[in-house]
Amino acid sequence: MSEEKSSLHPRNLHRNSYDFDVLIREIPELKHFVFRNKYDNLSINFSLPKAVKLLNKALLKHYYRIENWNIPEANLCPPIPGRADYVHYIADLLAESFGDIPKGNSVVGLDIGVGANLVYPLLANRSYGWQMLGSDISEKSLKNAEQILEFNPDLKNFIKLKHQPNSDFIFKNIIEPNDKIVFTMCNPPFHDSQEAAVKGNIRKNKNLRHAKIKTAHFNFGGQDSELWCEGGEIEFVSKMIHESQEFSKQVLWFTCLVSKKDNLSQLLKLISEKKALEVKIIDMAQGQKISRILAWSFVPLAEHKNYQV
């Protein structure tokens, strides 16, 4: 019996240890990166970008029927279990609004900063049948995401992509006047400079390899826009909260990941100033990494059930 990762969401398909025999059957190339660790368990070296990419490719194919998933070397290669957790916690949030988890394409979600990997829309649609819109400021990333959809034509009616031409905006240019969005989601840039992003990735690689490393591999990502922005996480999420008020009648739940716990008090104060009616902090853990989902709504709770689903 494989060991259960109890910190993951109860509906997460990745709570048990990876079955590498099954995953190698899906993506045979993965076998070159699998070895027995000191606990005599099969594993991969998570500091190697190609190993992580092949693992993701196998997980997406086996559990979510995603064919030919691929990303350029420069782009974010996300850990699938953690990304799946965000989707499942959003489902729980919507269940509180509607009385049960709403399924099917009447639920429209928006992923801000969808990236080349397209992971959140893929997981959201395959898990709950939701319709997803993904936005990004990088046309190169969107082109790769579009190629993933080309290999999975059954998803093209459920996942749409849209370019954000202005990095000063988050929802503007993306949400149209007649759109009704049930939820937004976002994994914002964490660092406040390229230098900080590089240093952070070197630290991550050191932890993974237990060795001295002077250059960053970016095994989990990526491009500048994915890793850092001026002002870092606090500035990005603050901008999102400011702008959300303008779309308060078109979105039921705004949500965003917040990595730094110390940022919460300032963000909660801003949400209060914008007069949001519902606010939630949802803790989320994957291994030793603790994150949280910040969610807010301008729609009165009594009106949630009737919100176009």
Image (tube, rainbow, N blue to C red):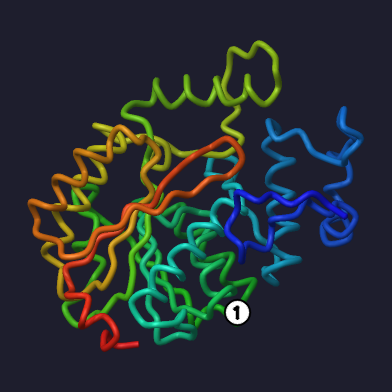
Q: Amino acid at mark 1?
A: Pro
Is 239 left or right of 308, judged from the image as shown?
A: left
**Residue highlighted by disc 1:** 153
Is 168 left or right of 183, judged from the image as shown?
A: left
Q: Give residue 278's position: percent from left, percent from top.
A: 22, 64
Q: Which one is in front, 203 or 156?
A: 203
Is 293 left or right of 71, judged from the image as shown?
A: left
Q: Quadrant of residue 94?
A: bottom left
Q: Give residue 87's position: percent from left, percent from top.
A: 49, 63
**Residue pictured at 22% horizontal, 75% vertical:** 301
Q: Is residue 291 above or below residue 195?
A: below
Under tag 1, what secondary structure? helix
Is 203 left or right of 164, judged from the image as shown?
A: right
**Residue pictured at 92% horizontal, 35% vertical:** 40
Q: Which one is in front, 305 or 105?
A: 305
Q: Quadrant of residue 1?
A: bottom right
**Residue pictured at 14% horizontal, 45% vertical:** 269
Q: Give residue 125's position: percent from left, percent from top.
A: 53, 74
Q: Give residue 112's position: percent from left, percent from top.
A: 35, 58
Q: Is residue 48 above or below residue 286?
A: above
Q: How many marks?
A: 1
Mark 1 Cα shell of 10 Å, populated few (<14), some (14-19), many (≥20): few
Q: Quadrant of the C terminus?
A: bottom left
Q: Quadrant of residue 218?
A: top right
Q: Which one is in front, 43 or 286?
A: 286
**Residue pictured at 26% horizontal, 73% vertical:** 252
